[in-house]
Amino acid sequence: MQNLVSIIIRTLNESKHISLCLNAIKNQTYKNYEVIIVDSGSTDDTVERALSIMDCQVLNCVQDDYFPGVSLNLGCEKSNGDYLVFLSAHCIPCDENWLLNLINPFYNNPNLAGVYGRQLPLPHSKPEDVRDLLITFGSEDKLQKIDSFFHNANSAISKVIWKKFNFDENTKNIEDRIWANSVISDKHEIFYSSNSKVFHFHGIHQFGNINRLTSTNKVIKRYSLFKTGDDKLPISLINSTVCIPILGKLKIFENEFLIIKTLDYLKKYDFINQIILYTNTEIPLEILNHDNRVKSVKRPKYLDDILIDTHKVLEEFSSYCKNNKSYPDIVFYMEEVYPNRDKLDLNDITSNLINSNYDAIVPSFVENRMILMKENNTDLSLLNTGFIPSSLGSNLLIGSKGSLMAIFFDSIIKDVVDLEIGTIEFDSGSEIFKKILIK
């Protein structure tokens, strides 16, 4: 019989990570748990997103000056479990046995006060963070009778022990080490479970000489201490929505609704949760029934103005989602008039996006031609020379957001100039850039 476990997650504006974290928890083989969110006053949709994923208790713990022990003790006090698990909202369990491997050591050693697990960097983690995590969290279990190292980003303690040893509420950091020192001094033991693994996007020190850290990171990779290629966030944890804006009447091409080609393309990807036709046009049943994920949503009339840009459409779409308590992690923006997307692999694009620091990814092609910009009615400025041989390539890329734009939901509200954009390059003659214009 599995004891009840209380998973306590501290949050503050974790919209980008909370879905990944909670979906990974839902996949666990250890099923007897409750989830408690201790939120420090998030101003994004962290809490709403969490509640849309699972039934969890939300505790508000806003502090003028943050003391982690206060939040931790509040979560423990309101918990019902025999064991208390602490997980940072930006820590993502690596597999379905994370919780089992964190709790099992308690059953084998009645003198255990706590267990902490391994933390792994992500493919896009900074060199100093890769170094810190890999040096600190090894690949071998260990029992600690003297060493009081403990880390609350991924850990568990006995509820009985917590009642005797609360977390210090007067320190702004290392509250976990202070707690561990207390239980070790009381002749209890701590266990490090190397198989209870989470991804952690930053390290535990977050400082250092960047040149030396980069060198250290290269050594780690050279000797295969960590194989980054095998350790990526899986797209199965992602909640994704496709937004297809439609201006005016549906287009007909070769005696068929043009939108059908895009819907046929999307049928290949079962990880997509819903496909929204964002329009003021009446959508025929044959299109709505083409895929059970398709839904027609009426958008504000002002979006039909030809001067409205993509970003404004996405902002309104974001508001629609929030008003309807829908919180996708990623939005795929696809325009009806770009039907030739077969070379765009959404599995790869999604994996690249969630395992990077980018806000969005768009396909692009190299532009070698001379590019001029009007500064007023008469003057032009040259953006590039236009005289570099095409064989040498160019630093200028033309992005095609109409054919596809994969963007994090929480990045939509950013100013366009602040977006970090990634790309996948194609030949300029690729069919994916072919726009079918129909009057």
Image (tube, rainbow, N blue to C red):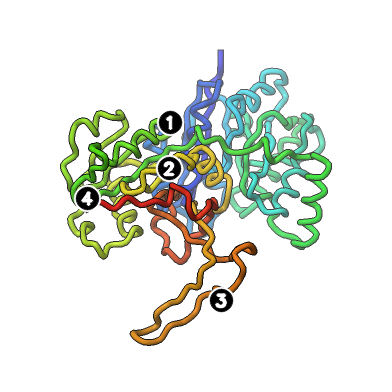
Question: Contact, CB < 8 Å: mark 1 with mark 3?
Answer: no
Residue at the top extreme, as displayed:
1
Q: What residue is shown at x 34% (from left), y 54% (from top)? A: 314
Q: Do the residues labelled 2 and 3 touch (CB within 8 Å)?
A: no
Q: Residue 220 carries which label?
A: none
Q: Residue 69 vs residue 39: left or right?
A: right
Name the disc covering residue 299, or none.
Answer: 4
Across and down, in percent, residue 247 comes to 23, 52
User: Which quadrant of the view contains residue 193?
Assistant: top right
Question: Which residue is labeled 1 in the image?
Answer: 268
Mark with earlier residue (3, 4): 4
Sequence-first tag of 4 and 1? 1
Q: Name the residue under label 2.
A: 341
Q: How many labels does the image show?
A: 4
Query: Which amino acid type is shown beneath numbered disc 3?
Result: Thr
The residue beneath circle 3 is: 385
Which numbered disc, 2 or 4, marks the residue that appears first in the sequence?
A: 4
Q: Is mark 2 on a helix, strand or loop?
A: loop
Circles 1, 2 touching at the beta carbon (< 8 Å): no
Kindly identify the amino acid type of the residue bearing the numbered disc 4.
Arg
- Judging depth in this view, the residue of 191 and 209 nearest the camera is 209
Instruction: Give the label, 4 or 1, closer to the camera.
Output: 1
Instruction: Bin the neighbour count of mark 2 within 10 Å (Cα to Cα): few under 14, some 14-19, many 20 and up.
Output: many
Q: How crowded is mark 4: few (under 14 residues within 10 Å), some or many (20 or more)?
A: some
Looking at the rendered structure, the kind of residue marked 2 is Arg
Give the foreground label among 1 and 3.
3
Position of the N terminus, as image quadrant, is top right
Res. 261 image quadrant: top left
Residue 108, given in percent of the width and then of the height, sits at: 71, 18
Of the residues shown, which amino acid type is indicated by label 1?
Lys
Distance between the Cα atoms at labels 1 and 3? 43 Å
